[in-house]
Amino acid sequence: MTRRELDVPRATRTALDAFALLSKKWHPVVVAALHHHGSLGFNGLLEAIPDLSGKVLTDTLEALRDAGLVDRTVVSESPLRVEYELTEAGADLEPIFDDLGAWGERYLGAATPTILLADADRRITDLYGQWLTDRYTVARAHTAADVDRYLREPIDVVVYDEGLPGVSAADVPAAVGADCRTILLLGDRPELDLLEVDCDDVRRKPIVRETLLEAIDDQLRRRGESADDRERASLAAKRSLLESVYSRDHLTRQAAYRDLESRLEALADALTE
């Protein structure tokens, strides 16, 4: 009897083959651990993955090597020490994990705020992600295409680096929409043109865990505030950063800073009326 194939497009059949490979209980867990930690030895993987036995890990690594997702490198012959790392094919699964995580939070999980971390340096987004994952759903964007793709989904707060290639810091707030809060991270000494960027908050790198969590929590807490309150908080954050870098005398000689002061005074007056 001739075996019939599933009547779906070829690309869908290939996707089903990929699902079959990763549907084994420990296969995606090992790939995820290597995504997160980089190369690890055998004992390092056992330590990173709870409840996994040595025999099952051996079998899983062998299957993933056969599938071309994991490489094994002998670091030392005597005593024998090996390390495992993802191949290019394995590393290319990372955005798929991110997309599945976002899908799961959207359709399967509780209503947890989603934070988009946008920085060209993956080490930075990995570090920030470690700080945030126990509180939020975290998405990571490393290119302009990544940012565009994620902004099509509901995002609560975008934390983005001013130097992300192909992304204008001034364009991000308009792209995310009024319901999303924005935190701009500056790697260099801020200039007065910062005042032209319509972000909700601005912080200077390097940033520590407590500061990042405080900034995100503040933005989430302020959702639903009036447009005037939102503008006032944004201008106050920019003024605070500029005053931490430049002297008061220097700033008051700048027309842009004087306009900032005038705008803040007008907003304060409006709140008291």
Image (cartoon, helix red, strand yellow):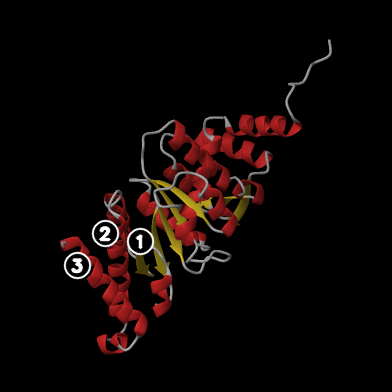
In the picture of the structure, the residue carrying the numbered disc 3 is: 269
Pick the residue in front: 213 or 258.
Answer: 258
In the picture of the structure, the residue carrying the numbered disc 2 is: 229
Residue 196 position in % (x across, y down): 42, 71
Disc nearest the viewer among 3 and 2: 3
Residue 72 position in % (x across, y down): 62, 49
Disc nearest the viewer among 3 and 1: 3
- The 10 Å Cα crowd at callout 3, few under 14, some 14 to 19, many 20 or more, is few
Disc with the residue nearer the chain's start (3 vs 1): 1
Figure quadrant of residue 241: bottom left
Quarter of the image that includes the N terminus = top right
- The residue type indicated by label 2 comes to Asp
Residue drawn at 77 percent across, 21 percent down: 5
Residue drawn at 48 percent across, 41 percent down: 102
Query: Looking at the image, is 224 positioned above or below residue 240?
Result: above
The answer to whether marks 3 and 1 mark residues whose Cβ atoms lie closer than 8 Å is no
Query: Looking at the image, is 85 positioned above or below residue 168?
Result: above
Q: How far apart are marks 3 and 2 (CA)?
A: 12 Å
Query: Looking at the image, is 182 positioned above or below residue 139?
Result: below
**Residue furthest front in the image:** 273
Pick the residue in front: 37 or 190.
Answer: 190
Quarter of the image that includes the C terminus = bottom left
Q: How far apart are marks 2 and 1 (CA)?
A: 11 Å
In the picture of the structure, the residue carrying the numbered disc 1 is: 200
**Residue furthest right in the image:** 2
